[in-house]
Each structure stands twice: as C-alpha cells, then as structure tokens.
Image (cartoon, rainbow, N blue to C red):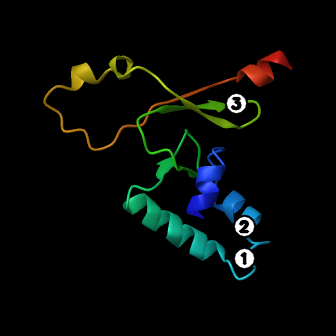
Amino acid sequence: MLEYLFKHSSHPTVEEIYRNLVPEIPTLSRTTVYNALNLFSEKDLVCEVNVGEKETRYDANTGEHAHFKCNSCGRVYDVWIEKKDWGVESLEGFKIEEKHLYYRGICPRCSRG
C-alpha cells in the first residue's frame, strides 16, 4: 500500500486504494487498508488529507505543502507555497501540532474545458 501511495500522487481514498490493489492481492480487505493507513499515518509515513469533505484521502508526500481540490473534477493537487505565506507569524506563543492548508476552486484543466 505504501508503494502504491508513492506511485500514485492522486491522493486516493481508502476505497480507491482497495479497488486498485485487490486484483493484485485478492485476500485484501477494506479493514486491512484502513488499519495499514492508520499505522502509516501514526508513524508519519503518510498524511491524511481532508479538503472540506467527509472523505479522507492519503498522501505519501509528508513534507510541508498545501492542497488544492477542484470543485469540478474532484482531483486534489499538491501546491507548494512559501512558508512566509502560511500566516504563522500571527501565532506567536502557540504550540502548533498540525498544519493543514487547502484551497478549493477550478483547476486549470477544467477551466480550459
């Protein structure tokens, strides 16, 4: 599963991971996928991506970056933004344990269509 996440930067859901891996691993269950992703997340091997919806997606890129979700096609993109633009200067004195930054709109591919 971890290899799949590294090869597919599409920020897949549990269902997408399961559906794509079960042909290769017929004994795979959704519970196994959930449990493995929870373990990977706990060990900081993957990060959970929640972009304003009720589905969790997974990203093998654990470095600091933001996400953009297209309201038209539903694709989630990695976005690299200068750290100075994250607005953390106003949080002096706060202990930040997690950071999540995401945008929603229409991606360039859908804008052209």
Q: Amino acid at mark 2?
A: Leu
Q: Which mark is residue 110?
A: none
Residue at image point 47% right, 53% down: 46
Q: Which residue is mark 2?
A: 21
Residue at image point 59% right, 43% down: 53
Identify the secondary structure beneath mark 1. Answer: loop
Percent across and percent down for residue 41 are: 43, 58
The quadrant of the rendering that contains the N terminus is: bottom right
Q: Nearer the viewer, mark 1 or mark 3?
A: 1
Evaluate if marks 2 and 1 touch, with contact meaning CB atoms under 8 Å apart: yes
Q: Is residue 56 left or right of residue 109?
A: left
Percent across and percent down for residue 74 are: 71, 37
N-terminal label among 3 and 2: 2
Q: Amino acid at mark 3?
A: Asn
Q: Which residue is mark 3?
A: 71
Evaluate if marks 1 and 3 touch, with contact meaning CB atoms under 8 Å apart: no
Packing grade of label 2 (10 A; few <14, some 14-19, many >=20) is some
Identify the secondary structure beneath mark 3. Answer: loop
Label 3 vs label 2: CA separation? 27 Å
Q: Which residue is mark 1?
A: 25
